[in-house]
Image (cartoon, helix red, strand yellow):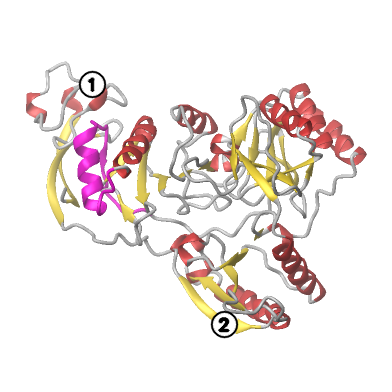
């Protein structure tokens, strides 16, 4: 196993100038390539197990260190794949700016209408709702076995505040979800909104994200992928310069160890194609290999992937829409691919004894990893058996494709009883005023009845007058 360190890239998005600075630090540390991690970070890899990277002002942490995590976001999908209407690229950036320090917990900020970035792999999973600037929050803190849904929607500008509050509460080791929720409510005033409907996650096939692709605006986006996850620094530095020349402000990393450049002007398309050609860059890898999640710096796993992809290719098998992962000894709650090949752990084997690995195959219910439910397909099989079994699963996927148009709603464990509550709703924009939460934007504390609000009170979202609000009854979770 190689020695590597992580460079924190908040939300998986950075300016070309920022990337170039990181690349120059890597060069000064004797590297000619970098790699990308599964949480949209950048990796410095070295054959020297004792290598200590000198990083100046750059935030670099040892690969497996605890206490510093990256924020994953689906900014990379914005504008090129399906998205929630209000969740624009600018909105992601504004939200990410609220996080001043690297979090101690894994945080995901995602759009449920895209498939490129996983929804539920963080400790705090903020998932966009249909209500503008409001998010579901699914928690699975380090000591929790099950995921829990926070009882109200979280306002965009409160995401960083609530994450920091929960991190502080963890130091006191809260025992369960109810205690965490109660402590958060007691600690900070939030501009929350009642959950009027459970999160719905449409099934979407995994997208093809490589090559030069046209946007509706007439501009282009470019997806680039390296088979071995070793990206040449000289090429990337030249690409950063070309981004600056084309006035491209951001480069986005994906969890599948690739990156995307959005907003290439139509008039610069030929210039970019020439650039890629001069560097000999292949931008048409088979879909058979783009849809894999392989452990970082693990040559054994990479060789297994190459073996399986070659077998698929020889048999003309389509895997479009599926994703595959290779993992070692991990619980299924960490998976975020449709099909998982798990390497069995060999225990109590003498050092001089030759043995062959065996494998298990599991797959997500409906082949959708967002269900977070995995079914065991086979156990303890030899590597030679894997291609045929995976091809069987691929055919099963296509046979059932279209039979289910929507995943089941993610279950809420320890769900609280439902109760009817009276709230006031703005006729113009549907914003709710709930006496239980008040209106933090206007310094109105929880418990203030709507009738007691001043006559000049206006909607926090559209500034509609108080008279525009009507009383409605909603079925919601009891706090």
Quadrant holding the N terminus: bottom right
In depth, the one of 345 and 399 nearer the eye is 345
Judge the density around disc 2: few (<14), some (14-19), many (≥20) Cα neighbours within 10 Å. Answer: some
Magenta-drawn segment = 172-199
Q: In this rendering, does residue 211 appear at all?
A: yes
Q: Is residue 406 above or below residue 38?
A: below
In depth, the one of 54 and 113 nearer the eye is 54
Per the image, the residue denoted by label 1 is: 442
Q: What residue is rendered at 25% in x and 54% in y?
A: 176
Q: Quadrant of residue 426?
A: top left
Q: Is residue 424 above or below residue 305?
A: above
Q: Is residue 462 above or below residue 251?
A: above
Tell me if 192 is positioned left or right of 297 in this view. Answer: left
From the top left corner, tell me how far across and down residue 90 is, in percent. Answer: 52, 29
Per the image, the residue denoted by label 2 is: 378
In front: label 1 or label 2:
2
Q: What residue is rendered at 9% in x and 30% in y?
A: 449
């Amino acid at each position: 196993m190689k020695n590597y360190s992580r460079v924190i890239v908040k939300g998986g998005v950075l300016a070309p100038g920022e990337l170039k600075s990181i690349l120059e630090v890597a060069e000064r540390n004797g590297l000619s390539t970098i790699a990308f991690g599964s949480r949209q970070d950048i990796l410095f890899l070295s054959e020297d197990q004792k290598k200590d990277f000198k990083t100046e002002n750059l935030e670099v942490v040892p690969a497996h260190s605890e206490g510093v995590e990256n924020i994953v976001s689906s900014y990379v999908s914005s504008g090129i794949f399906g998205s929630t209407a209000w969740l624009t690229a600018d909105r992601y950036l504004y939200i990410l700016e609220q996080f001043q320090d690297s979090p101690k917990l894994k945080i995901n900020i995602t759009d449920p209408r895209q498939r490129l970035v996983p929804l539920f792999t963080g400790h705090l999973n903020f998932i966009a709702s249909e209500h503008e600037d409001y998010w579901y929050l699914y928690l699975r803190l380090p000591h929790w076995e099950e995921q829990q849904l926070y009882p109200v929607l979280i306002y965009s500008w409160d995401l960083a505040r609530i994450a920091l509050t929960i991190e502080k509460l963890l130091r006191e080791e809260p025992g369960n979800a109810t205690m965490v929720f109660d402590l958060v409510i007691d600690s900070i005033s939030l501009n929350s909104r009642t959950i009027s409907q459970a999160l719905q996650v449409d099934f979407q096939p995994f997208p093809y994200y490589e090559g030069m692709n046209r946007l509706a605006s007439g501009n282009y986006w470019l997806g680039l992928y390296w088979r071995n996850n070793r990206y040449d620094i000289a090429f990337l530095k030249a690409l950063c310069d070309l981004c600056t020349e084309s006035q491209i402000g951001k480069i986005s990393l994906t969890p599948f160890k690739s990156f995307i450049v959005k907003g290439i002007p139509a008039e610069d398309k030929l210039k970019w194609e020439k650039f890629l050609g001069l560097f000999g860059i292949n931008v048409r890898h088979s879909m058979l290999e783009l849809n894999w999640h392989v452990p970082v710096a693990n040559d054994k796993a990479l060789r297994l992937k190459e073996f399986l992809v070659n077998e698929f290719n020889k048999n003309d098998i389509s895997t479009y829409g599926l994703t595959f992962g290779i993992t070692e000894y991990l619980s299924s709650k960490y998976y975020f691919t449709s099909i998982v090949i798990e390497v069995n752990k060999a225990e109590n084997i003498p050092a001089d004894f030759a043995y062959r690995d065996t494998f298990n195959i599991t797959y997500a219910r409906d082949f959708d990893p967002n269900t977070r439910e995995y079914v065991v397909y086979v156990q303890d099989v030899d590597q030679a058996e894997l291609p045929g079994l995976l091809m069987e699963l691929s055919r099963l996927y296509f046979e059932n494709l279209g039979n289910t148009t929507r995943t089941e709603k993610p279950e809420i464990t320890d769900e609280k009883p439902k109760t009817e509550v009276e709230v006031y709703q703005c006729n113009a924009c549907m914003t709710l005023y709930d006496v239980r939460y008040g209106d933090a934007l206007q310094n109105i504390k929880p418990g203030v009845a709507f009738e007691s609000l001043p006559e000049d009170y206006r909607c926090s979202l559209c500034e509609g007058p108080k008279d525009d609000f009507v009383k409605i009854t909603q079925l919601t979770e009891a706090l």
